[in-house]
Image: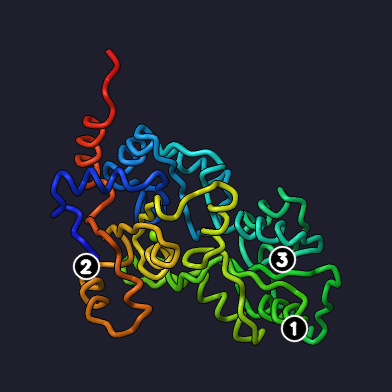
Amino acid sequence: MAAINFKTLNDDDVNEFFNSFDTVLTDCDGVLWIDMRPMKNATQVISTFLELGKRVFYVTNNSTKSREEFVEKCKTLNFEATKDNILCTANLSACYLQDLGFNKKVYIIGSKAIAKELTEVGISHTGVGPDSIIENVPYRAFKKDPEVGAVIVGFDEHFNYPKMVKAASYLNDPNVHFIGTNTDERFPAANNVIIPGTGSLVRCIESCAERKAVIMGKPESYIADLLKKKYNVNPKRTLMIGDRHNTDILLGTRCGFKTLLVLTGVSKLHHITKWKRSKCPEEKEYIPDYYINTIGDLLPYLEKFKCKTITPST
Ligand SMILES: [Mg+2]
């Protein structure tokens, strides 16, 4: 059984580990930063990976930012990034519909970022923003837009009953595509306040539409398919770094990536102990190959490895 404490590796094991991958997929929230606070030494770890010639992709289930907005955030926090190494669910949803040759309109429960990514690939949309309850107008009076051929559900602070009525009505037609950006149930708790995540909204629409959504984000395999197809990524030479067992680590396990869990976000050491004892096969898939307290703790190992592998030019 895996779940090796990274800090117990000897020098040879560490070298073997860093030599075993060419591509790094890293989750963002809870790994590289929390809100606008970068984790200690995280920027140096990413820049050292890049110096060593590793390809780095930022892989996030967050649907509230477009790729451009993620690049901006990375730059503000000193992480090197371009649109091409951001995999976010607003963009993945647009790519998915584009791959299908979709040419109708999308009803969005979600953010402006989804709208922006759809516009970029020439797909029209409706639904972003508040949708108020109009007094004395019965919900039965809602008239479907015949152009709508897909419903996307992402994170939406304006989520409410009228949006549920619309989404479920569109989805009553089995030809209408149903996309969920991700299934994260909650955001990491702060001050004991529970912030429901997109997964809660997706489950709600699935329930009233009596259908299952196609999920874009981790742990579903669309991301991995895209990485293989578009970027030629070899799963066997790929490392997935994440803080969440049922998205980051599960994606890695399912796709044959090496996995490294950091303990700065959702999943903790006591969870690993629980999964190791569990008889449930899915919980076994949550067990990472390695774990380490924070991504920044990789820095001294990476520095040492860099000295050995990159000979300074004289
Ligand atoms: Mg995370």
In the structure shown, which secondary structural element does the residue marked by tag 1 occupy?
loop
Height in image: 167 above or below 298? below
Report the coloring of the rendering: rainbow
Amino acid type, callout 1: Asn
Q: Residue at x 82, y 76 (%)?
A: 144
Q: Observer-nearest residue: 165 or 47?
A: 47
| Quarter of image, ligand 1 | bottom left
Amino acid type, callout 3: Gly
If you read the primary sequence from the N terminus, does the residue marked by circle 3 or circle 1 appear first? Answer: 3
Disc 3 versus disc 2: distance between alpha carbons? 41 Å
Q: Is mark 1 within 8 Å of ligand 1?
A: no
Amino acid type, callout 2: Leu
Residue that label 1 marks? 172
Q: Quadrant of residue 49?
A: top left
Q: Is mark 3 within 8 Å of ligand 1?
A: no
Residue 216: x and y in percent read 57, 64
Residue that label 3 marks? 127
Q: Nearer the viewer, mark 3 or mark 1?
A: 1
Q: Observer-nearest residue: 52 or 268?
A: 52
